[in-house]
């Protein structure tokens, strides 16, 4: 169904030209996928050019040697831009790794957990559980302990635990948490209060650079690029100097953070294209006005959808506790059950809104609205949420 037909049918789809902001291209749909996700129009256009001929070199960005000067500039600039956006202090390194955030689940404890030590984990969702499980596997190898400091599993992860429910270990090696729970749609709007001297380690995979971040409050942050900061293939790790040096130098080289620091993210052939896109996204964020501007925009976008759900709450269940709602992933389902969810997803698809099916662990729908997602798409979805409830309620 074309956007014009959809407007006649439901009146909720934004004008087709608004689907893809800058170019007004009408052949693109609203992409609510949880990641990989949208890239801004102007970046896609830039990539199209650079794939063919990067900076007049006669070779595309994907064809240049990572050892060539031209690529050296790309990776240096990407790192500088990532640092500048969040004002990352001098005593932190930024490295680009591979293996996704999932691999950080074992790389973090391999470097930071020593024999006899305990690390605390707060599990607020599927990914936090996987971090915890892998850390336990590593701890069993090194002779350490992983403490489950808190979990929200009792309500299928619909909330972020209060401080009083978090049982921390004295002198833990670190405290790990997941800032945004992509599958369940909850987000930390404060930091867990780790005892002083205990580094905070954060899986920021699904909300990195969607709001301001005070890096000095963390020991280590990791995030795959493909949601808020580029394409899939690289994981950005922001790590404090003392933690870089924590890993046993006898570990295999590719398992040590210090290898990536020493070899400037290139101990082997790096995910060159993905790193290039991180540089473009970082510049784009700067051009938008930085993280505070993006945070405001992301709040507005999420509010459009949550308001629609709140206005029709006889029909829909929004999964997350109100104060813990994610600004990145809005998770909801119909009170009427799965068949109603499926009908909604099909109707949304027919109206140019794709990627709304929830993860099997949470069911229902999930609207992922990362940095590059346009507010027009939030209005389109909110319109359908209200309209569908009215017609089917
Ligand atoms: C919060 C969180 N952590 C970790 C991951 C895993 O990331 P990757 O697939 O890049 O390993 C995801 C993926 O969606 C995520 O949302």
Image: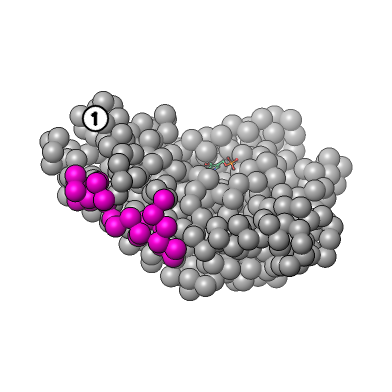
Q: Position of residue 198 (x, y in %)?
A: 61, 54
**Image quarter in which the N terminus is found:** top left
Residue 93 visible in rendering = no
Based on the picture, tell me whether residue 192 belongs to the magenta stretch. no
Q: Position of residue 261 (x, y in %)?
A: 78, 57
Q: Is residue 126 depicted above or below 191 in this figure?
A: above
Helix, strand or loop for disc 1:
helix
Residue at the farthest right position: 250
Instruction: Pick whichever, 105 or 38, lies toward us.
Output: 38
Q: In the rendered view, does 372 fall on the left or right side of 252? A: left
Instruction: Pick whichever, 387 or 248, lies toward us.
Output: 387
Q: Residue at x 48, y 73 (%)?
A: 289
Whether the residue under disc 1 has CB within 8 Å of ligand 1? no
Would you call the spot at circle 1 few (<14 residues within 10 Å), some (14-19), or many (20 or more)?
some
Based on the picture, tell me whether residue 10 belongs to the magenta stretch. yes
Q: Residue at x 52, y 72 (%)?
A: 287
Q: In the rendered view, does 319 fall on the left or right side of 336? A: right
Q: Position of residue 106 (x, y in %)?
A: 67, 38
Q: Position of residue 92 (x, y in %)?
A: 69, 64
For ligand 1, the image quadrant comes to: top right
Q: Residue at x 62, y 71 (%)?
A: 84
Q: What secondary structure prevails in the magenta region?
A: loop
Instruction: Pick whichever, 18 or 146, lies toward us.
Output: 18
Q: How is the image coloured?
A: one colour
* Residue at numbered disc 1: 340
What's drawn in magenta, residue-wise?
4-27
Instruction: Pick whichever, 342 or 172, lies toward us.
Output: 342
Residue 282 visible in rendering = yes
Q: In the rendered view, does 193 fall on the left or right side of 296? A: right
């Amino acid at each position: 169904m074309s956007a014009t037909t959809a407007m006649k049918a439901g009146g909720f789809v934004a004008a087709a030209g608004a689907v893809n902001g800058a170019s007004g291209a009408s052949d693109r749909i609203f992409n609510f996928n949880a990641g990989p996700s949208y890239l801004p129009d102007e970046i896609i256009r830039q990539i199209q050019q650079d794939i063919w001929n990067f900076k007049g070199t006669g070779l595309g960005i994907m064809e240049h040697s990572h050892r060539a000067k031209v690529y050296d500039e790309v990776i240096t600039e990407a790192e500088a831009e990532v640092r500048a956006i969040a004002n990352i202090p001098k005593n932190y390194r930024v490295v680009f790794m591979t293996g996704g955030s999932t691999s950080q689940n074992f790389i973090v404890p391999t470097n930071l957990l020593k024999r006899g030590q305990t690390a605390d984990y707060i599990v607020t969702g599927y990914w936090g559980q996987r971090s915890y499980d892998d850390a336990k596997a590593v701890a069993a190898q090194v002779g350490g302990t992983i403490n489950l400091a808190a979990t929200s599993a009792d309500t299928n992860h619909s909330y972020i635990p209060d401080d009083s429910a978090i049982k921390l270990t004295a002198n833990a090696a670190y405290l790990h948490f997941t800032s945004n729970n992509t599958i369940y749609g909850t987000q930390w709007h404060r930091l867990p209060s780790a005892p002083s001297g205990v580094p905070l380690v954060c899986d920021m995979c699904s909300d990195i650079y969607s709001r301001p971040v005070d890096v000095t409050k963390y020991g280590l942050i990791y995030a795959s690029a493909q949601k808020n900061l580029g394409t899939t293939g690289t994981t950005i790790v922001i790590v404090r100097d003392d933690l870089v040096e924590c890993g046993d130098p006898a570990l295999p080289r590719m398992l040590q953070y210090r290898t990536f620091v020493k070899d400037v993210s290139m101990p082997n052939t790096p995910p060159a294209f993905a790193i290039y896109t991180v540089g473009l996204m970082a510049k784009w964020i700067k051009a938008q006005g930085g993280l505070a501007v993006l945070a405001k925009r992301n709040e507005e976008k999420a509010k459009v959808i949550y308001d629609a759900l709140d206005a029709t709450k006889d029909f829909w269940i929004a999964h997350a506790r109100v104060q813990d709602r994610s600004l990145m992933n809005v998770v909801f389902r119909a009170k009427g059950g799965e068949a109603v969810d499926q009908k909604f997803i099909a109707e949304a698809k027919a109206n140019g809104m794709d990627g709304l099916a929830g993860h099997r662990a949470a069911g229902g729908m999930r609207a992922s609205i990362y940095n590059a997602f346009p507010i027009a798409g939030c209005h389109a979805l909110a319109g359908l949420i209200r309209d569908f409830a009215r017609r089917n309620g």
